[in-house]
Amino acid sequence: MNTESFLKRITGKTRAREAGVLVALIGMLIFMGFASPFFFTSQNIFNVLRNTTTIGIIAIGVTMVIISGGIDLSVGSVMAVSAMVMARLFYHGFGTLPGMLMGLAFGAFIGVFNAVMVTKVKLPPFIATLGTLSIGRGLTVLFATGIRGAVASNITVTEPLVLFLGGGYLGPVPFPVIIMALLYAFFGWFLRNTVLGRQVFAVGSNEEAARLSGVNIDRVKLFTYTATGMLAALAGILQTGLLSTAVTNAGQALELDVIAAVVIGGASLAGGIGSVWGALIGASIMAVLRNSFVLLRLPGFAQTISIGVVIILAVALDARKNTNS
Amino acid sequence: MVSLRKVLLTVLVLAVVAAGVFASGRQETVTRELPPGPPFASAAQPADSGSVMPIRASDRPIRIAVIGLENNPFWVPVREGAEEADRLLRQYNGSVDWIVPPGDAHTADVFGNTIEAAITQQYDAIATIAGDSGIVPYINRAVAAGIPVATFNVETDAENNRLFFVGADLYRQGLAAGEAMADFFRARGNTAPKIAVMTGFFSVEGHELRRLGFEESFAAAMPNAEIVGRVETSDSDANAYQQAQDFITANPNLAGIYVAAGGNVGAARAIEDAGLAGRVFVFAYDFVEQTMDFVRKGITAGTIGQQPDAQGRDPAIRLFNYLVAGEIPEAGRMLTRSDFVTAENMADFGF
């Protein structure tokens, strides 16, 4: 079997998975359209889309990490610490663009650190990123400390550009939704049409075979973890703009929601299979679920249960499909 | 060659023997008998809450450990209160060490080890957060070693040997919030407002006490009001923002959002972004800077405090008075004030 047909087979399998969850999402949308008169109002649709952006943007990176056979548990902390670095720099008089760039660079730096731990120190990705999850959370508190006394404080952000990026609109469309759409368009194209993008699949499918084919495994992993760090930082900056505050507890337990979205979207935790579009569908399913519970006045605890049920159903159906094929 | 397994086994055996020797030595050193405190569940709101003073100087140096958290802005005034107690007690031959255990939660796994360390360091008294019943053995161990313990901010219902508690009665805070919200809407001529309820976590007892207290008093004061939903924010402003948007969408005539724990800033921001300032109001807790910004704007109708400075200050000074003068606090639960701060009266509270 040559590389081309191997990748085609993976691509075909990925599309089948995407189609399955897309049908589930459409089913939910139809149900909600009947169940709540408010669901298909433009205001609500844009709310749901905006609420998809934090998980959706980070899910792009985590999808690539998972396709390459890794996992990244640090994204929630990276999101928080990058936003806090930015806010702290603003607090000390940095300009808007330098502050934002430093926030993004900090996220990228943690991504590089994760990659080095995985590729050079040979730590399992689960352990390496579990470590940076904790380090990132601690650094968030450190960077938030000293604004008022010696205790960590949330930092108010007033820079108009940051507020616009996170909370502004272009016409009726929330700006983070536009940023997310552009990112999906780019990474969707990138993964299918560039050498590095296809190498991400090759590494996750069979790392040894990819190595023998001349793929630079370390470079691929460095790319996936660094991109994920930057995307998490971007999500943190957007959320800070939305709330006009960098908060110490931003992104807590977010990594689980992101991984859930990626898995619901059809990515295999064993690596080699997945797509960013699937992750977007997964993130949308979670956002619609959360929206539905408020619109339908259902008890809050049922929301948490339902997300767990959806994850189990998605993975179980996927496993059954694999067995049958 | 000696195997690694044998070396580890030897080290383990030596460690156990050493621990046994030291532990048995420590058990013999009970330092003093402590006079009994007030009944565990008795409650009072002391007139000197936040302003209690040392009674007299001690003959010997008194060291008090105050074990708190520093993971969010709520703790800024708590720490400041503990530092003020330290400044005061130094004039009376006492001192206070503010100690933050490694960890991010109110739970016993975070606080237990630090209480044990404080016992080992032979502090004269300990004030600690007591978030769950797992903390009880640690408190009782300190008291058995002759070290009086006070709890503050939150404490478990499980009875233990602590001397007293300083903090808010969260259920009463909820009752106060319900009455304040009912008064607010009645004054605006709205006797049947639609309200959304947000809590931090349904699984956190303190959050539930606030929520249930609120719902009880609000329903009694405003029987025609409707609660359109109850959600948990996970103490996250980002989650609260999304949920507030959803409530606004589903209930075009929503009048208010009650936030029992973290998330009030996100809810207020969602109301502001929706252009509903002056039509939908948030009711919140605590005096965090960003919350007060929204109180100033009138989007947050009011916020209920719990005297965080007193929670850091009073336990240390009351423990000092107990040790030097045998003064016993008037009740087991020394409740802090639940001031309702609005845009109109915030200047009176120093904002």
Image (cartoon, rainbow, N blue to C red):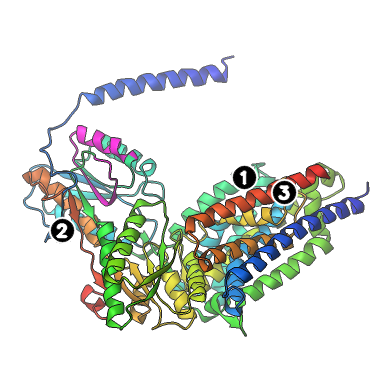
Report the Cα–Cα distance between label 3 and label 1.
25 Å
B148 within the magenta span: yes
Q: Nearer the viewer, residue B239 or B49?
A: B239
Q: Quadrant of the N terminus of chain B?
A: top right
> Is disc 3 surrounded by few (<14), some (14 to 19) or many (20+) residues within 10 Å?
few
B134 left or right of A273 in image: left
Q: Which mark is residue A317?
A: 3
The x, y position of residue A135, in whole percent, is 51, 51
> Amino acid type of disc 2?
Gln
Q: Which mark is residue A208?
A: none
Which quarter shows the C terminus of chain B?
A: bottom left
Q: Name which residue lies at 87% across and 52% down.
A: A9
Q: Nearer the viewer, residue A148 or A248?
A: A248
- Against A144, is B99 above or below? above
Amino acid carrying label 1: it is: Phe
Q: Are marks 2 and 3 on the same chain?
A: no
Query: Looking at the picture, which amino acid does disc 3 mark?
Result: Leu
Q: How many marks?
A: 3
Tag 1, which secondary structure?
helix
Which dot marks residue B45? 2
Instruction: Determine contact: label 3, label 1, CB under 8 Å.
Output: no
Q: Please state the extent of the stretch shown in magenta in the rendering.
A: B134-159
The residues bearing labels 2 and 1 have C-alpha atoms spaced at a distance of 50 Å
Disc 2: which chain? B
Q: Is residue A71 magenta?
A: no
Which x, y percent locates residue A263? 68, 53
Q: Can you tell which quarter of the image residue B289 is in? A: bottom left
Residue under numbered circle 1: A126
Above or below, B296 against A72 in this view is below
Looking at the image, which residue is at 70% across and 69% down? Answer: A183
